[in-house]
Image (tube, rainbow, N blue to C red):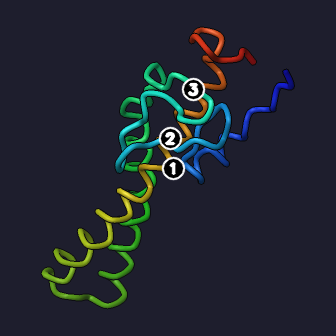
Amino acid sequence: MMVRPLPSWWRVALTCRCPRCGQGPLFTGLLTVRQRCPVCGLDLRAHDSGDGPAVLVIFVLATVVVGLAFWVEFRFTPPLWVHAILWPVVTIPLAVLMMRPFKAALVALQFRYRASEMQGGRGS
């Protein structure tokens, strides 16, 4: 049996596919990791990204949004209600869009570097 190389973690993150075969979808629904890859059968239950993606999204997105909020405030001096409406409308969709690839990246990295500890994975 020919062993295929693992897909790169960034490709798994961008496509949200299985970290072993790169073919099967990683998620069911918006952010729920599948129990098993439908293509290669990898057991994904042990690959839990925990709070890591949320923390990364908070750090990255908060830095950008706060910087933009300061820029808008000092450049245009809008009334407070503009900030109250603008930033939730920008922040919430961006946070949801960023969570999927960040979560997929952490699952892929965990599979790659902890695979020897988990059943069905390959060691590095």
**Residue at horizontal 33 percent and vertical 65 percent from the top:** 93
Looking at the picture, how far across and down is residue 31, in whole percent? 37, 45
Q: CA distance from mark 1 to mark 3?
A: 21 Å
The answer to whether mark 3 and mark 2 are in CB contact below 8 A is no
Looking at the picture, how far across and down is residue 8, in whole percent? 72, 41
Q: In the depicted view, which residue is nearer to us: 74 or 5?
A: 5
N-term-proximal mark, 3 vs 2: 2
Q: In the depicted view, which residue is nearer to us: 100 or 40?
A: 40
N-term-proximal mark, 1 vs 2: 2
**Residue denoted by label 3:** 41
Q: Residues within 10 Å of mark 2 (few under 14, many from 20)?
A: many
Looking at the picture, how far across and down is residue 99, in whole percent? 41, 50
Q: Disc 1 residue type?
A: Pro
Q: Disc 2 residue type?
A: Leu
Task: Please determine whether, in this image, residue 90 is positioned above or below residue 45.
Answer: below
Left or right of residue 36: residue 58: left
N-term-proximal mark, 1 vs 3: 3
Q: Residues within 10 Å of mark 1 (few under 14, many from 20)?
A: many
Q: Identify the secondary structure beneath mark 2.
A: loop
The answer to whether mark 1 and mark 3 are in CB contact below 8 A is no
Q: CA distance from mark 1 to mark 2?
A: 10 Å
Quarter residue 70 falls in: bottom left
Q: Residue 26 has which mark?
A: 2
**Residue at horizontal 84 percent and vertical 21 percent from the top:** 1
**Residue denoted by label 1:** 101
